[in-house]
Image: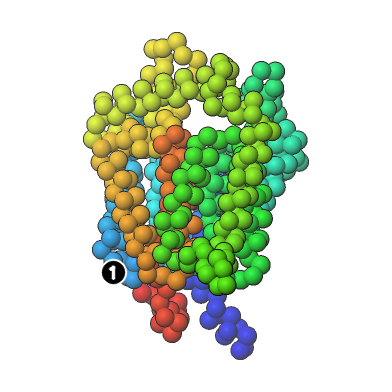
Amino acid sequence: MTFIHDLRQHVTPARAVEVGVLATLALTPVWYRLPALPLLPDLYVMRFLILLPVLWTLAAWLLSGFCGLRALLRDPVRRLWALCWLLLALWAFVSQSWAFMRLLHPEVAATAAVQLCLVVFFALAAAAAGPSPRAVVAVLALTLLWNAVLTIAQALNQGPVGLIVFGEFRMTATSPGASVVVAGAVRWLRPYGLLPHPNVLAGFLAVALLALPGWILAEEKRRPWWGAALLLLGLCALLLTFSRAAWLGFAVGALTLYPLLRRHLPPPLHRAGGWKLAPAWRPIFAAAFLTLLVVGGGVLLYRPLLAARAGQGSENVEMRSLADRSVYTAFALQAAGDNLLFGVGCGNFPWRASYDLRDTEFDLRGDNVHQVLLSAWAELGLVGFTLLVGALIFGLEAALRSLRSVADTRERAGLLAGVLALIVIGLFDHYPYSMFQMQLLWWGLLALALRPAPLPQAENAAAKGVPV
């Protein structure tokens, strides 16, 4: 009986929220889809494996009496973030009533609205009662490990490596629609991981790499070197995705780490019988050296492919990619102008683009515009655009304030750098806004970076057992 009593004390709904958030983050680089689940609406978003830990998280948070919500809302900036976030979900849900395809295909707006609502409440649960940033960094590091190994194996094999049962796509360099880099006679397949496109895989790798300062700057003796080894492996994998937006996002995120952490780092050199490098800076310089080594080696090994991705020459694949993006951008601007305040409805822009393509000679199908803010404006109008930008601004401000007042600054800074990387990626690609897994990653990491500092131990124990 004592064992059961102790188990009940430790396995609480609040603990279950933490487990659900960590499981969700671990499944973000997995596209696996399930059979139709009973008791759930027959919508596209309801078939993802990642939905299960999301529902677990929300159910556990409900059973805990919305644990941590009161502490979250004490701060006015966090209140504004939550308000913008909730209003955005409400606006997306209401947009079904005027959606472009509301009569012929109402499920289009319904699945996009339900998806955004799930992300909103998941982010609120993570901000109120989520796991510690240290646990989040550990999960991201382990997930980075197996994704980096899989990415490198697929790149070397130039195709799947036998994980079809786990959702691996059967793509080769000659498969129709495969994402390849072409340079002269070389046709090189970009690795997919367990996701539907190499760009999405690259986005996850960039975010997970930026979380590694939590290990590289750790005070333990071994963890920094494990972090440096993971950095080397992850950088190799990120290079092999040939995703320009993810490369840029990672670079911007990495550059922001120093100003985020500057106040918490000692001077790089100290004078003790001569100038010596401070111990805390040794893994930092090792990480910088490894980064330069991987980038330099990649440039030498893949120079023709990199030149093709940079736009040098006239490869049809790259020219077609740029032309397609310009077409969707023009259609999005037109849709935003025609529906300035309300937009075409949540998730409906690809259908509006398909309608506009009927009057052109372009050999294209309807697709998302490769720009997050423009996509939000086209689908949710000026109102939705304003709420999205407001949620970002207030969320970033709350996260920056948290960095000044918590002990886990290294971990939070890495999470915030990942959020900034996804913002940069969103300027050139749509998946942080359109894809369920990446929405959860983007807004989940921001929620975990801005969550209030932990309470003192006794008060925290009481909060775990009593709804607040």
Image point (59%, 24%), residue name:
308
Q: Quadrant of residue 174?
A: top right
Q: Is residue 149 visible?
A: yes
Q: Which one is nearer the viewer's eye here, 18 or 467?
A: 18
In x, y percent, where is residue 183?
Answer: 64, 21
Q: Which image quarter is the C terminus in?
A: bottom left
Q: Which residue is mark 1?
A: 74
**Label 1 Cα crowd, 10 Å radius (few <14 / some 14-19 / many 20+):** few
Label 1 sits on what residue type? Arg
In x, y percent, where is residue 325?
Answer: 45, 25
Q: Which one is nearer the viewer's eye here, 354 or 262?
A: 262
Q: Is residue 82 above or below residue 35?
A: below
In x, y percent, where is residue 147?
Answer: 65, 48
Q: Is residue 347 visible?
A: no
Q: State how the image is colored.
A: rainbow
Left or right of 426? Residue 71 is: left
Q: Quadrant of residue 222?
A: bottom right
In x, y percent, where is residue 6?
Answer: 58, 84
Q: Which one is nearer the viewer's eye here, 321 or 18?
A: 321
Image point (29%, 33%), residue name:
343
How many marks on residues? 1
Left or right of 189? Residue 52 is: left
Image point (62%, 88%), residue name:
1
Residue occupying the far front of the picture = 274
- Assign a secondary structure to mark 1: loop
Residue occupying the far bottom of the picture = 2
Residue occupying the far top of the picture = 361
Image point (44%, 34%), residue name:
428
